[in-house]
Image: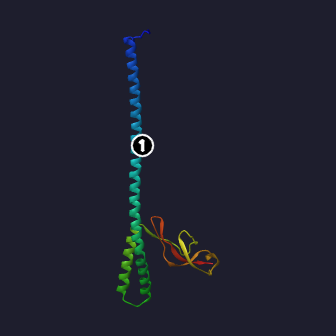
Amino acid sequence: MAEKKKKSPAEGSADKIEEALKAAKEAEEKAAAAKDDYLRLMAEFDTFRRRSAEERLALVASASAETIKGLLPILDDCEIALSQLKESSDSDSAKEGTLLIYSKLKAYLKSKGLEEIEAKGQPFDTELHEAVTTFPAPEEELKGKVIDVTQTGYTLGGKVLRYAKVIVGA
């Protein structure tokens, strides 16, 4: 008969200690994994929150750009009315009233970030200008430059809202 070895109390304690250490190590690994998952989740949430805020700002900017774009024809009409009134002999009050409306509208739009694209006399730039036609340049130095502006262009926040429609010297 084979003799069963009985473990001494010291050996039994060592096994229990070893098992406890193994369990503690596993618990530490699980805790580290859970902490890592938590940190990743928090980073993802922070990214989501920042991206959502940026999208909201872009949506508001887009809406304001569309509103301002809708007001540009009114600004154009005011400019036309002013040029017509300058040539006519109508009352001065009509001229002053139209100029007042035009000035207030332009000041309001400028406060919202609208800027006029300077075109006349500038070199033709496809990033800012849209050529309506070309015209023989009256002077050699006007070749490739904008001779006249048929419709004013505007930028809003550094982005082109409407290209300037121009006549280019050939």
Query: In the structure shown, which secondary structural element does the residue marked by tag 1 occupy?
Result: helix
Identified at 44% across, 83% down, the residue is 80
Identified at 45% across, 69% down, the residue is 115
Name the residue furthest bottom. Answer: 89
From this view, report whether residue 44 is shown above or below residue 61: above
Which percent across, then down, holds residue 157? 45, 64
- In this rendered view, identify the residue nearer to me: 113 or 11: 11
Which percent across, then down, holds residue 27? 38, 30
- In this rendered view, identify the residue nearer to me: 126 or 60: 60
Which percent across, then down, holds residue 13? 37, 16
Image label count: 1
Q: Which residue is mark 1?
A: 40
- Check the picture and name the quadrant holding the C terminus: bottom right
- Check the picture and name the quadrant holding the N terminus: top left
Image quarter of residue 114: bottom left
Name the residue furthest right. Answer: 140
Name the residue furthest front. Answer: 1
Q: How is the image coloured?
A: rainbow
For label 1, the crowd category at 10 Å Cα-Cα, with few meaning under 14, some 14 to 19 and many 20 or more, is few
From this view, report whether residue 102 is shown above or below residue 50: below
Q: The residue under label 1 is which amino acid type?
A: Arg
Which percent across, then down, holds residue 149? 52, 78
From this view, report whether residue 165 is shown above or below residue 92: above
- In this rendered view, identify the residue nearer to me: 132 or 87: 132
Identified at 41% across, 56% down, the residue is 54
